[in-house]
Amino acid sequence: MTVRVGILGATGAVGQRFIQLLDDHPTFELAALTASEESAGKSYREAAKWRVNTPIPDDVAEMTVAATTPDDVPDDVDLLFSSLPSGVAADVEPGFLDAGYVVSSNSSNDRMAPDVPLTIPEINPGHLDLIEIQREERGWDGALVKNPNCSTITMVPTLAALDEFGLESVQVSTLQAVSGAGYSGVTSMEIIDNAIPHIGGEEEKMETESRKLLGTFDGAELELHGMDVAASCNRIPTLDGHLENVFAETADDVSPEAAADAMRTYESADLPSSPAQLIHVFEDLERPQPRLDRERGEGMQISAGGLQETPSGLKYNCLAHNTIRGAAGASLLNGELLVEEGWV
Amino acid sequence: MTVRVGILGATGAVGQRFIQLLDDHPTFELAALTASEESAGKSYREAAKWRVNTPIPDDVAEMTVAATTPDDVPDDVDLLFSSLPSGVAADVEPGFLDAGYVVSSNSSNDRMAPDVPLTIPEINPGHLDLIEIQREERGWDGALVKNPNCSTITMVPTLAALDEFGLESVQVSTLQAVSGAGYSGVTSMEIIDNAIPHIGGEEEKMETESRKLLGTFDGAELELHGMDVAASCNRIPTLDGHLENVFAETADDVSPEAAADAMRTYESADLPSSPAQLIHVFEDLERPQPRLDRERGEGMQISAGGLQETPSGLKYNCLAHNTIRGAAGASLLNGELLVEEGWV
Amino acid sequence: MTVRVGILGATGAVGQRFIQLLDDHPTFELAALTASEESAGKSYREAAKWRVNTPIPDDVAEMTVAATTPDDVPDDVDLLFSSLPSGVAADVEPGFLDAGYVVSSNSSNDRMAPDVPLTIPEINPGHLDLIEIQREERGWDGALVKNPNCSTITMVPTLAALDEFGLESVQVSTLQAVSGAGYSGVTSMEIIDNAIPHIGGEEEKMETESRKLLGTFDGAELELHGMDVAASCNRIPTLDGHLENVFAETADDVSPEAAADAMRTYESADLPSSPAQLIHVFEDLERPQPRLDRERGEGMQISAGGLQETPSGLKYNCLAHNTIRGAAGASLLNGELLVEEGWV
Amino acid sequence: MTVRVGILGATGAVGQRFIQLLDDHPTFELAALTASEESAGKSYREAAKWRVNTPIPDDVAEMTVAATTPDDVPDDVDLLFSSLPSGVAADVEPGFLDAGYVVSSNSSNDRMAPDVPLTIPEINPGHLDLIEIQREERGWDGALVKNPNCSTITMVPTLAALDEFGLESVQVSTLQAVSGAGYSGVTSMEIIDNAIPHIGGEEEKMETESRKLLGTFDGAELELHGMDVAASCNRIPTLDGHLENVFAETADDVSPEAAADAMRTYESADLPSSPAQLIHVFEDLERPQPRLDRERGEGMQISAGGLQETPSGLKYNCLAHNTIRGAAGASLLNGELLVEEGWV
């Protein structure tokens, strides 16, 4: 079975990753690319400044870019991936949902809306059922699913694994790659021989999205997880791969070994882009490292390491590829889940 | 009054910083430079591969390097600064102390010894009185004072300022510059486009040294501070300046404003190399940044910023120049305190 | 004698360098700052995002920013430094010249105009006399002087020193710092772990400006130097300091030693911001290096090194600080020359 | 047909690349790994600090490392790849040749020896016949073939393509990646925010090896190519991929278009690891760039771009992956040629 998919915002950095990831996809067939008005009508090759380190697939290069409106997207497209800037997405996504499209969106708008599923397929697939409430309340024929922010998604699988011990408090520091800010988001003068201890909005995203992802949906309402989360977010001079230091406190005592086991055995999902093992745990205290480990599992696996006791709980490090697992790959996986669960 | 000083291990990275800092010193006169056997007898210019970004002072360049033994150091040298590798220092420092020298040492050996003062002059000058116990127990004529590790010293002044609210728990993540590992400590292949979530021994140093620095000395015994400290240490691709994210819990409630006030008004010391204000607090959440702020106060001021509430306390960031305030400048300041307090 | 000076385009990267360099200037007093319409009327502190590594001088921070039109600049300002983007400068500079201002401009427009002096004070001060022709032809009361591009100025002093041997051909490769493109000119995604073998317009600037700088002005017409110049320009991940590899052929044989002598003894100018020695020549083949040597002579000295024979001539390397000697410092020095020669 | 191969010096950076490249090789089967005495007897997993960004192949990880002597290498190994440090190689390689092994060596010793073929299979395969002279003169049963230095091999294919126009003079500047110096060859303190305008021995290698590679072998003696070559070599902060700026003069006039055609159509070799097209020529002046283009053709293709006229000839840029095409891949390809030509 082939599903025809489109990309809203196909020329940007995340859009290019979507194209790269869809290139050999077993069931998704790329059938529409949209971008801003000025790119509409051009071939993708002309419209996009291609910067990914594999060549543009030839057939994609020759596709004509459409404007980002429902009228310009073919009706037989079943599923749309959105990597629009959040301001644009907030304006444009509702039109596609009214028009009946299923949208798996990486944009940050509406992530915390009570009727929008914020989903990581391996963690909280059941939250998809929020779509029914969403349709009822908003009168949409389509469906909107969001994936979390790249810094959130790096940490949440490890927290999900630890939650069997009763998570109470999480403090996390991030060392984030420049690609997380988009191609032009961080200038070289800002970051060479430097680090920036603040990323606008990022700390709040980590603090709220993680509680929604681990929250409980009883069919009627989604209750946020009760843990406390405090985050400090830093930008550092790496290209790809967010590294995070987590300090966690749990209701039950948990040894580093038990925590590592819980992570290693946390079940992955049976979807085309899900890694065989969701979390790889290193013994070597010096791992994971962004450049060495971001490509694990085609960029879809989470890495963890450095599990050690602290006076009040555990500390450990985790890492994920921020533009694959943390952006395009996250939306793609949600798209696969939507198909699997029959929403597409 | 002029004090004649020497440097043990003068050719290394920290040794070069000592020379740079002593160049215009108001009371210290550089009178001896020691290095390994193979450098002994050479001029300093020949012996050292000078890598600091100011030229070698001409008179220092012409000085003859001595071997690192008490016999080779002139008797009229009053105070020695030690920047030897800790293994070498452990072997060599006792000989200088037996011979009656006062040694202000940056080397990590013996920092946690109960009779060795671990001192930041602005924080715990009274700990110097441990020297009397030290002399009694070890039979030394000289005196040994240590300064803390570069990652510890970056954080402790801010903790000292917060301790009026009753520090109970500290969790800290560091983003440390490559110079902290010495000139050849981190290869370019290890760190370009990367970060390393572990620095051997560093976490334990932060966890123990900070409790000694804020501990209480009653004239007989030094009691460690009772707070819990957990640290995660990371190396990132910056040259100089350690940036740290601190999460702190205190017995009394403290607002970010009150915390900032406590930091801003924490008293500095009246020593030649102490900054007028010990801690500069930024309002701008994006500061402090290593490249922009490490040189504040000639590299001797601590910077802080990003003070915000968390569910269980406070979070903030701090920064210091790791090879000035965190190494050579720290020993120098201890030397100035030793003179001020009459130990030299 | 105090000269009142202004800066056109004071909020940009080069504008900030002007302010830094003028802070302790012996004869220039900063009396006007201009920027775009939206900054006009604000205090400089509000208008500029200050990014230089020394604090904004307090008095400058409180100055009110004017619009970049002659009407908004006080009449008693004697000399203007221009660091406007070249497109803006081409529109705006003529108005200031009509209004009688003397303008020392770093902007690239009009550098090759036959009646505009393109000047490095230590190299071709006599070209200033083109101002008389300029005034005659353009009907200006003021005077316009340009300094060359940062990559040109790095190389030309060494070429001037070699020209006593009859320069015939020059081939040069540059390794240029990101600051040369302005604060936001090079994104971090473009340059981390990378290099870019092209900088728009740069090669042509080097190839033409160098021939004008070493050209001959007979009082009536400026004849370009007859040498051939070919340049390849590269951007690399350094912050400041352009490094260049030069291959030069001369009519007369010249040994590396004779070439080094010619460089070392090439006369500097007797102006406040001119270095005591114009060109420092290293024996060590590994020098000059951008980070270690860009600050020599307060960023105004040229460094050279690696002089060696080739089958057809000489090769060597040279380096200068691109935003000091290569931009703000270059204009400042031209301003000092204009005063010295009585044009202000 | 399967050829059993071994790697001398298998634990180093180039050794690891050999293992990576041999992992899926159609005809070579890895049968021996050697390293220093202290590694001998250990499993490869224990002996090597694996730093390549793909996991160690499981079967290789379990192989036992042998000492680097002919006695410890199984007799049924047909071909050895050598990535020993050149000093060690000079001592050790002759023993293997006496013992009858065919050795394809990346080590720099003996590259310019008149009876040792220095070979790039696509450029000068006929030089392999020097082996007969080598055997005669040295009494070896085996055969020794060398590949050129990484900086040489980046440039020589483009020169070979231009030689139909009669190469007379070449001046080249290199921007070389840190991996070219080995894993620990360049410290982070040396290269972050910096560049180093000298690499010991590198310039001479480029100047001599290129003339041997393009030289003529008449069956009795190898005559070096008559062109003049002058090189300036720089280290910059990139991980992999050497970028080079070439200025070339030819006897016949050649337009940039004709030069590009000559490069694009220069024939590749019909060997398993040879790319379909030897040289890819970019139209975009900003390419090739190390990070974007080093992986072309599995790291075995040469990239060129920026072809433009100069007053005396041509300028252009070229790029190759220095540890694949420039080291392990180069030796591998020579090994494939040795098999193809019947020497193994």
Image (cartoon, coloured by chain):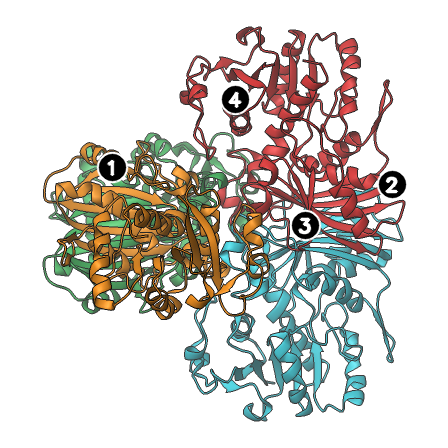
Chain colours: A red, B cyan, C green, D orange
Instruction: Describe residue B91's horizontal placement relative to residue B56 as left or right.
Output: right
Chain under callout 2: A
Q: Residue at x 57, y 93 (%)?
A: B71
Q: Do discs 2 and 3 belong to a common subunit?
A: yes
Q: Disc number at residue A166? A: 2
Snapshot quadrant of residue B154: bottom right
Q: Residue at x 18, y 36 (%)?
A: C136
Q: Which residue is mark 3?
A: A282
Q: Quadrant of the C terminus of chain B?
A: bottom right
Instruction: Describe residue D181's horizontal placement relative to residue A269 as left or right.
Output: left
Secondary structure at numbered mark 1: loop
Identify which amino acid the numbered label 4 is placed on.
Ala
Q: Nearer the viewer, residue A233 or A256?
A: A256
Q: Nearer the viewer, mark 4 or mark 3?
A: 3
Q: Nearer the viewer, mark 1 or mark 3?
A: 1
Q: Disc number at residue C216? A: none
Q: Which residue is mark 1?
A: D267
Mark closer to the chain start, 4 or 3: 4
